[in-house]
Amino acid sequence: MEDPQLLYCRAYQERMNLITRGLAAAALLALPLATTTPAAAAPEPAAAPMSLTASINALPTADEDRTGYQRTSFKHWTDEDRDGCNTRAEVLIAESRIEPTIGPGCRVTGGEWFSYYDGETWTAPGDVDIDHVVPLAEAWDSGASAWSAQRRQAYANDLGSDVSLIAVTDNANQSKSDQDPAEWLPPLAGVRCTYVAEWVGTKLRWSLAADQAERAALARVAEGCGQQQVDYALAP
């Protein structure tokens, strides 16, 4: 059996490599799909990095309420920048560790994706899901029920953060479903600090609340996370 510490180190390094998104971004720019180049977006206001514990404490506290939730309330996999690629394709292209193969209509047909939740690598796009780190239902429960349809769409297609949407094993994503960290954490224990930091950063980015059970679970994980920090930029 492979050394768990080596597996953790590999998973952590792979996650850091994904966040750079350099190679895949270059592949996207090379696509002859868009007839115009969108104007550069204004930088989003970035908060100063905080410790994981301080970030958890910065989350507003509120009870969750799923009344009225429908997944269709969050229109997703749209083409927000109108470059011919929808959000799912954008993430697949950005996170592929090799230059992806792309067919007509920006259909991604090949590449290589590392799922940091479980340390698995996949080459078939059909084996990869795009996970909302904070699930749509959880966002609804935590404050998005009061948003406009346009803001919920922006949340569901958030390409302004490297960690709001990530490519993961389909089975891991289905196992997670709409659960928060009180109910589900990645099966690869060594990446849970990274996951919790990304969860908290996403909630802070979108000014979403946490309930008491969620806060307690986040705090338990944070106890073993040393100097883990949370970086995020407020959503426009």
Image (spheres, helix red, strand yellow):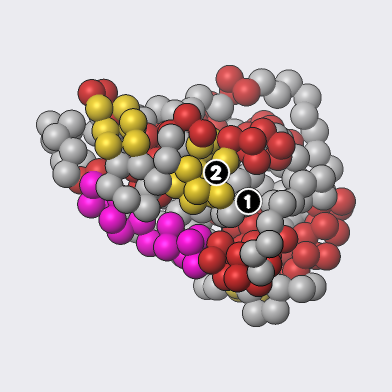
> Taking 93 as reference, is 218 left or right?
right
The question of residue 26 being in magenta is answered with yes
Residue 180: percent from left, percent from top: 75, 45
Q: Which residue is mark 1?
A: 118
Q: Which residue is mark 2?
A: 168
For the stretch drawn in magenta, the main secondary structure is helix
Q: Name the residue located 61 percent from the left edge and 65 percent from the top edge.
A: 7
Q: CA distance from mark 2 to mark 1?
A: 8 Å
Residue 175: percent from left, percent from top: 71, 37
| In the image, residue 24 above or below residue 135 | below
Q: Is residue 62 visible?
A: no
| The N terminus: image quadrant | bottom right
Q: Give the numbered dot on residue 166.
A: none
The residue range painted magenta reads 13-27
Q: Furthest residue to the bottom?
A: 227
Q: Quadrant of residue 63?
A: top right
> Taking 102 as reference, is 1 left or right?
right
Q: Secondary structure at mark 1?
A: loop
Label 1 amino acid?
Asp
